[in-house]
Amino acid sequence: MALLGFGVSGIAAVIYQKKIEKYYFKFLFIESLLFPLFLAAGFYISAFLKFNPYELALNVKQVLNIFLYFSMMGIPFFFGSSVICMVLMRNPIPSSYFYNLLGSGSGALAAMAASFTFHPYDIMIIIIFLSFIPVILLSSLSAKVYFITSLFAVTITASVTVYISSLPGFKNVSEYKAISGALNLPGSGILYNEYSPLSVVQVVEAEGLRSTAGLSIFSPYQVPVQKGIFFDGDSMSSITPFDGDAAKIRYIEYLASYLPYYLQGKKNNGKILIIGSGGGESILKSILAGFKEIDAVEVNSSVISLMKGGLAEFSGYIYNKKNLSIFNSDGRSYIKQTSKKYDLIEISLLDAYNTSASGVYALNETYLYTTESFEDYFSGLTENGMLSVTRWITTPPRDTFKIFNTAIESLRKLNVKDKENHIAAIRSLQTVTLLLSKSPFSPSRIDCLKKFCNDRSFDIIYYPGVESDQTNRYIRLSGPVYYNAFVKLLSEEKDKFIDNYDFDITAPSDDRPYFYNFFKLRLIDYIKKYGPSQLPVTEWGYLILLIILLPVVIISFAGIILPVLMIEKNTVKPDIIIFFSIIAAGYFFIEMPLIQKMTLFLGHPSYSISVIISGLLISSGIGSYFSDKLFPEKYRILIPSLSTAAIILLYQYKLDSILHELVSLYITTKILVVLSLIAPPAFFMGFPFPQGLIQMKQKDINSLPLAWGVNGFFSVISIISASLLAIISGFRIVFITAAVCYIIAGIISLRFYRYK
């Protein structure tokens, strides 16, 4: 939406070119003033907008809400971009564009830094008032009426901000999120609020607040009243009260995810690695099972500080235990850098059921559930060690089938010949627990697994030698669905089964780390057959990308391309359209996969987004500054474009190995490494756009805002299409496409110098 606003502003500048030239300062002041005003209006309206994405297929009001939401987000960027466009029309382009990108990149870093201290809404308020500074500076250079107008606007905005921010519901989380349900319980309240770039962390206490997954319906033990840690209002992680008396937490022994602890037996329990320790339920499992050495990985530092601080007494000081080591890292980064071997590695329910079941994570990459990650986990096990992965059961089955396939595929890639003997799985009412064993499952372990399931009425899905009639006995389905799928995935019919299944259960890889994407085109027929009510429980995340693409293309065409076609044809050269569209595609086809790839290295998407965007913008800005100082004039686009393509193609084959060697560095050092790696291509990426604008400005001033608008339009399309291409074909293809775009742009640029 930001880039759409940028694109439309360029076309508006073309249409009102003569008026802008005549009343330049007035337009500059008005556009600068409207930016913070609409930024504030859009923010405050969206803060109170009751939007539920799950109702989009059923409720016309929600369709209107999403368009209102997008419009309020896009309008401010129209005015902000108009200012930049007008500045470029009057001032030297390389230096002006440099300052623009420098400010943009610095702003991205500043926003991340601020998110360690402030609530996101408070950060937005700060940004709104910072954006008034240019208005006041402009007004101070002209007549008093401008200065008085700017002060009046600041005063009104401040008054409205004070009033709205004092309203009780201003910072309330959406009523459609899990925390709202918890806060409706008697005696509920928020005990703690913590902020970081990763999420807003809130701790809720309430009478009767209990949450655990995969508990046997015949458990003789009650789950005690807990406290809950919520991440951005969702994905609750429960904190169980513990005073050291193991008898009070024995309900844990009746969780399906307790199976690997049960199989190990207390005498064999040496080292365990817990990926995603959260509120500490898996740590309590380790205590019950008698593990001597517990390593826990938690990516969110706020959780660690809370569990070691304000929640320490309630949780029984489990994060402070002598035999526990807590690592503030993501699981994949930790396992790649440690040399330890573990008797058990556990990954249990790192996301909420509703987000998993609805498919809203379809566009999110995760490196925890790729074939390469399973290979890393497997190599981190002792000879008799096990990997345990617990996932939610979704209907129709897809999440669990994909995790089965991923595990089996990883064993195949590791050349485990008798892979069917290294794998087992069971099912509760809510969850599936999958086990991968470094050594083949022994008869004694299989007997323990059967006893565990029989005593707790859990259904066996698979173990070496299992028969169909031994499955689907307690929580009965229409047939042994999970067993049948497991057997087919282990058989020679695997590829046929995957191809014919309604959902995409192909094993994700580091090149396509979209574990949560299950979309296939045949799902459209599924929705037609069962009606729109099934849309939220199929693949909403991927579909919403396609749904958004259509109105964005229509709005972009109406706001950018259509006006271009209405402009006098002799001022619109095809080369302009092609060049500025293709460098827009190339830029974002590099940015998007870099963000995804660096997520694994830096440990979290929030860090990756901030660092990559900041680094690209600042380095591109520096490139813009030097773009008219280096290389012969005729080749100031060609040479940097070819250099960009060459570096990107080199990174395609070498980047992963470089990052693998440096994965053990501290996060601050990693950030410096990332910035140094992206600086060379980003520097050259800063040349084509300003140099192209210079050529337009020299030949035809009307073409400059037109080029700005076309670039904005294709930037919008490229963001969405890059995501689609990455999901379908992987990052490698996106990178190669970007390199081709820059090569073509460089060749086309040679034609600019033929214009008279």
Image (cartoon, rainbow, N blue to C red):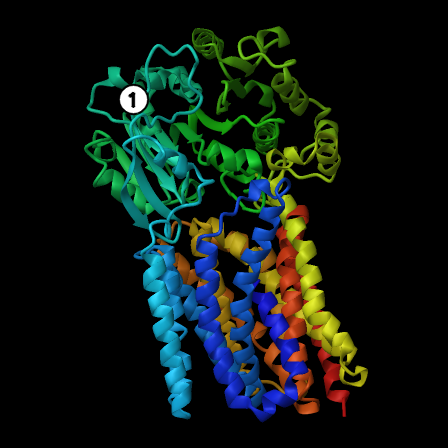
Q: Secondary structure at mark 1?
A: loop
Residue at image position (61%, 45%) is 512
Q: Quadrant of residue 706?
A: bottom right
* Residue 403 located left or right of residue 740: left
Q: Tell me which residue sits at (37%, 64%) in the image.
A: 125
Q: Is residue 568 visible?
A: yes
How far from the left and from the top, in percent, is residue 245? 21, 19
Quarter holding the N terminus is bottom right
Q: Is residue 458 above or below residue 593?
A: above
Rendered location of residue 607, percent (x, y): 43, 55
The answer to which image quadrant residue 503 occupies is top right
Q: Nearer the viewer, residue 71 or 221?
A: 71
For residue 313, side relative to residue 617 (left or right): left
In the rendered image, the quadrant that contains the C terminus is bottom right
Residue 132 placed where, x, y %? 39, 75
Which residue is nearer to you in this view: 661 or 606? 606
For badge 1, the amino acid type reads Pro
Horizontal side of residue 3 vs 755, given as left or right: left
Tally of numbered tags: 1
Q: Residue 168 location in percent, x, y?
A: 33, 50
- Given residues 596 and 336, the one toward you in this image is 596
Q: Nearer the viewer, residue 685 or 709?
A: 709
Q: Residue furthest right?
A: 569
Residue 625 makes an appearance in the image: no
Q: Decide: is 47 above or below 142.
A: above
Which residue matches tag 1? 224
Q: Residues within 10 Å of mark 1 (few under 14, many from 20)?
A: some
Rendered position, 195 above or below 438 = below
